[in-house]
Amino acid sequence: MIDSYQRDINYLRVSVTKRCNLNCSYCGAKNEASEELTPAQLEKIVRAFARNGITKVRLTGGEPLVRQDIVEIAQRLAGIDGIKKLAVTTNGIFLKRYAAELKRAGVTAVNISLDTTDREQFRSITGYDGLDKVFEGIDECERAGLSPIRLNAVLTKGKNEDQAESLISIARNRKIDVRFIELMPFSSDGEKDELVVTGEELLKKFPELKPFVKENATDFEKSVARYYTAEGFKGRVGFITPVSNSFCSECNRIRLLSDGKIKPCLGNSEVYDIKAFLDDEERLEQEIKKIILSKPREHSFGCGYGNHHGLNLIGG
Ligand code: SAM
């Protein structure tokens, strides 16, 4: 659906839970119980979104794979008329167990968050000694035929900025895209701008990376990431730069939070509760249309960090 600023809003990110099995220092997720939508409620809402022009859905969280019914959720959403692509964003810990089942349920692509290839640093960032599990999960995604497989890394100054090289080497050796996401101001105490490693800084350090341009990219291949590659690389290196360079004019996404509220813009505190309309499909569809039309022109991280929801609730 075309919104008030001529953007085609066709991509819905669905946070299925606030819970997470990891405790990443910059994210703020906690493994505590919270309100969650049932698979049937999620199906109803996503169907109403599909009638409003959403064609691509990404399951996220918290950690989506902590939900015991994640395969049922995937199956239900993949079966909705108009949903052409279903993807998952995960920390990868449970992927070994779920990759093949999710593929069978209709998931095609997977993004795995990985900020370091160093076991001790992984433990220090996430609070869990799980690096091996993540790599086993990545292998399982390849075996299951999930594609594309992307790794998303957040680098923080003074913590893991030294990891850029080893993460990039994964894109050199495997058909996996490695993407660097700038640290956004979401943690409860507010991340400081000086901790952000910008895409520009990284590109200066790796001059061998050249822009990757794909002619006639399909809608699904269009992304907020700017991609680069180098001689001999099997995968690409991407940069997602919400802090240094906003991409609001091309934003095609909207978010359903795990508590059933809709968030039209990641960098804006406005949310809309649609749970009251769950039993009236027509009304639900109309309300969602209104909410899409209310999507702001641009995000406003600068308007006060405390105004934003944690990324564990929003799902990134
Ligand atoms: N648990 C899943 C995972 O780990 O991918 C999905 C949710 S997690 C909140 C989604 C993404 O948000 C992760 O890649 C994580 O690194 C990123 N993220 C969390 N806090 C962030 C922040 N302050 N700035 C930028 N990205 C952040």
Image (cartoon, helix red, strand yellow):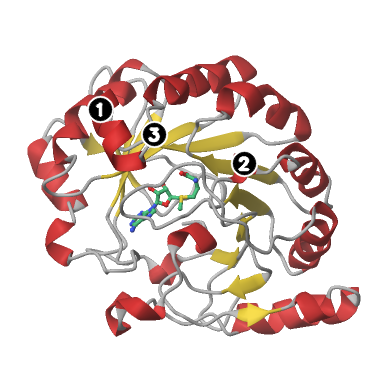
Disc 1 designates what residue?
120
Q: Is mark 2 within 8 Å of ligand 1?
A: no
The residue nearer to you, when weighing 281 against 252, is: 281
Disc 2 designates what residue?
66
Q: Which mark is nearer the camera, 2 or 3?
A: 3
Around disc 3, counting alpha carbons within 10 Å, would you say few (fewer than 14), some (14 to 19), or many (20 or more)?
Answer: some
**What is the count of numbered marks?**
3
What SS does tag 1 mark?
helix
Q: Which mark is residue 128?
A: 3
Distance in Å between CA atoms under marks 2 and 1: 23 Å
Q: Amino acid at mark 1?
A: Glu
Q: Quadrant of the N terminus?
A: bottom right
What SS does tag 3 mark?
loop
Residue 165 to residue 31: above or below? above
Of label 3 and label 1, which has the lower sequence position?
A: 1
Are the residues at dot 2 and dot 1 in contact (C-beta closer than 8 Å)? no
